[in-house]
Image: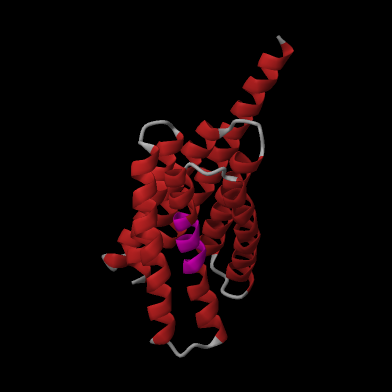
């Protein structure tokens, strides 16, 4: 069920990215966010009930709620046409928690892929905070980051898990490379954005 949730999250994030890029209708995307958000709230409750409910199991399943509440919040905010400041500050809170999950992934589990994935999610949630609370418009940049992350951190890993190939030899290290290249790509896009804005201001 975890993998199914990741797959659906990938779809929701992909649509959210397209929405930010102006290629998908806001309210239509908002409805899909509600669908995925409801699933991401029900699924962890079930997984917790059938688990041994040790602290680390609860820690892992709690992460699903972070996604579920995000998608519900996005869906309601978009459909109702509300200001996004509340969503923004919630996203800031989640981005801080994501850094904790990143740290645990690196230090407790020694899982570089999971650690880099949480780093990317922390960055994306921080961007959601920024575009909903700050006046500077970086919507296109956030849309591109969301679309890329929807595939490399959610959709494709979920498909790997569902098809049973995630443990294949070499795939783990290949995915470290994929995530690392994505980080460099986001840095490059951010530099281009900053450089272009600075050049416009200097004219």
Q: Position of residue 189 (x, y in %)?
A: 56, 32
What is the quadrant of residue 186 in the picture? top right
Relative height, residue 62 to residue 113 (above, below): below
Is residue 25 toward the left or the right of residue 136 in the image? left
- Give the mark count: 0
Q: Position of residue 147 (x, y in %)?
A: 42, 42
**Which residue is at a point 55% across and 77% down the rendered structure image?**
59
**Which residue is at a point 36% across and 36% down the rendered structure image?**
25
Colour scheme in use: secondary structure
Quadrant placement of the N terminus: bottom left
The one nearer the camera, 19 or 160, is 19
Q: Among all residues in the image, which is located at the extreme top? A: 203
Is residue 169 toward the left or the right of residue 134 in the image? left
Is residue 31 toward the left or the right of residue 55 in the image? left
Relative height, residue 135 to residue 129 (above, below): above
Taking the magenta stretch, the answer to whether it contains residue 202 is no
Q: Would residue 157 be seen by someone viewing this image from the given angle?
A: no
Q: Among all residues in the image, which is located at the extreme right? A: 202
Is residue 84 toward the left or the right of residue 144 in the image? right
Q: Which residues are magenta?
A: 64-72
Quadrant placement of the C terminus: top right
**Which residue is at a point 60% across and 27% down the rendered structure image?**
193
**Which residue is at a point 45% across and 90% down the rendered structure image?**
52
Q: Among all residues in the image, which is located at the extreme left? A: 163
Q: Would residue 150 be seen by someone viewing this image from the given angle?
A: yes
The one nearer the camera, 156 or 133, is 133
Q: Position of residue 91 (x, y in %)?
A: 59, 53
What is the quadrant of residue 110 in the picture? bottom right
The secondary structure that most of the magenta stretch takes on is helix
Q: Position of residue 173 (x, y in %)?
A: 46, 59
């Amino acid at each position: 069920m975890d993998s199914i949730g990741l797959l659906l999250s990938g779809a929701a994030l992909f649509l959210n990215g397209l929405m930010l890029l102006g290629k998908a209708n806001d309210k239509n995307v908002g409805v899909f966010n509600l669908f995925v958000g409801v699933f991401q709230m029900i699924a962890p409750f079930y997984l917790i009930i059938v688990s041994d409910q040790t602290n680390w199991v609860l820690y892992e399943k709690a992460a699903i709620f972070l996604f579920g509440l995000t998608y519900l919040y996005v869906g309601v905010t978009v459909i109702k046409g509300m200001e996004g400041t509340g969503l923004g500050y919630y996203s800031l809170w989640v981005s801080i928690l994501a850094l904790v999950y990143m740290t645990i992934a690196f230090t407790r589990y020694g899982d570089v892929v999971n650690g880099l994935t949480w780093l990317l999610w922390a960055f994306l949630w921080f961007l959601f905070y920024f575009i909903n609370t700050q006046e500077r418009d970086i919507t296109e940049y956030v849309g591109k980051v969301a679309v890329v992350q929807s595939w490399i951190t959610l959709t494709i890993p979920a498909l790997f898990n569902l098809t049973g190939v995630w443990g294949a030899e070499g795939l783990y290290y290949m995915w470290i490379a994929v995530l690392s290249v994505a980080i460099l790509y986001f840095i490059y896009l951010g530099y281009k954005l900053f450089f272009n804005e600075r050049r416009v201001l200097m004219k």
